[in-house]
Image (spheres, grey):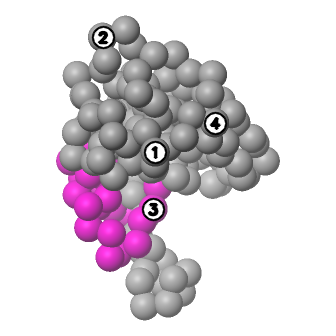
């Protein structure tokens, strides 16, 4: 199980509210694991990773990208990075996805995110220029287990 030090609390205050994309979610109402391990659970279109000390990361999944699942945001508190939080959030997003395909994207310059996506089974499927000048957006696809043999 992933454990994280307690010193990230100041980065992620307990009354943090995430908004955007037509939803507003108060992350104060989250369950905590009694043994101190990171616990990931789904909150509408937001997956939350937390420890008894507080929030360590979140992942937003939306269904507005050609009616397919799309991870629009993956955020892990800096002190929690490298402890498997992002990997667990992406796996939980795939497990709870309501469509056969789950997409995400990141800038070409974001090498840590690209390595994470490749490590957990996502594949690069295209690139779009012009969103961020000089830094193309790379799109990734995670085909879910029930459809992998069909493609």
Q: Nearer the viewer, mark 3 or mark 4?
A: 4
Count neighbours of disc 4 (C-alpha within 10 A) and say few if under 14, some if 14 to 19, many if 20 or more: few
Distance between mark 1 and mark 3 Cα atoms: 28 Å
C-beta proximity under 8 Å, tags 1 and 2: no
Count neighbours of disc 2 (C-alpha within 10 A) and say few if under 14, some if 14 to 19, many if 20 or more: few
Q: Circle 1 sits in a helix, a strand or a loop, which is it?
A: helix
Which corner quadrant of the image does residue 6 belong to? top left
- Give the camera-side residue of 12 and 92: 12
Q: Residue at x 55, y 25 (%)?
A: 42
| Quadrant of the rendering where the N terminus is positioned | top left
Distance between mark 1 and mark 2 Cα atoms: 22 Å
Q: Residue 149: x and y, percent? A: 32, 35
Q: Earlier in the sequence, mark 3 or mark 4?
A: 4
Q: Circle 4 sits in a helix, a strand or a loop, which is it?
A: loop
Count neighbours of disc 3 (C-alpha within 10 A) and say few if under 14, some if 14 to 19, many if 20 or more: many
Judged from this view, the residue extending furthest toward the bottom is 134
Distance between mark 4 and mark 1 Cα atoms: 11 Å
Q: Circle 2 sits in a helix, a strand or a loop, which is it?
A: loop
Task: From the image, tell me which residue sits under label 1.
Answer: 10
Q: Earlier in the sequence, mark 3 or mark 2?
A: 2
Which corner quadrant of the image does residue 115 belong to? bottom left
Magenta highlight on residue 124: yes
| Quadrant of the rendering where the C terminus is positioned | top left
Task: From the image, tell me which residue sits under label 4.
Answer: 15
Distance between mark 3 and mark 4 Cα atoms: 28 Å
Q: Circle 3 sits in a helix, a strand or a loop, which is it?
A: strand
C-beta proximity under 8 Å, tags 3 and 2: no
Q: What residue span does the magenta drawing correspond to?
A: 101-125
Q: Residue 16: x and y, percent? A: 62, 41
Residue 35 - label: 2
- Give the camera-side residue of 9 and 95: 9
Task: From the image, tell me which residue sits under label 3.
Answer: 105
């Amino acid at each position: 199980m992933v454990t994280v030090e307690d010193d990230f609390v100041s980065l992620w205050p307990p009354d943090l509210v995430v908004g955007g994309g037509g939803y507003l979610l108060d992350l104060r109402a989250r369950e905590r694991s009694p043994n101190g391990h990171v616990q990931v659970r789904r909150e509408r279109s937001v997956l939350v990773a937390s420890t008894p000390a507080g929030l360590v990361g979140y992942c937003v999944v939306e269904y507005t990208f050609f009616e397919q699942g799309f991870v629009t945001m993956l955020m892990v508190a800096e002190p929690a990075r490298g402890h498997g939080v992002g990997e667990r959030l992406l796996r939980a997003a795939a497990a709870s996805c309501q469509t056969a395909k789950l997409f995400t994207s990141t800038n070409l310059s974001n090498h840590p995110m690209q390595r994470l996506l490749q490590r957990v089974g996502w594949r690069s499927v295209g690139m779009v220029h012009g969103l961020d000048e000089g830094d193309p957006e790379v799109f990734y696809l995670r085909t879910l287990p029930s459809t992998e043999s069909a493609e």
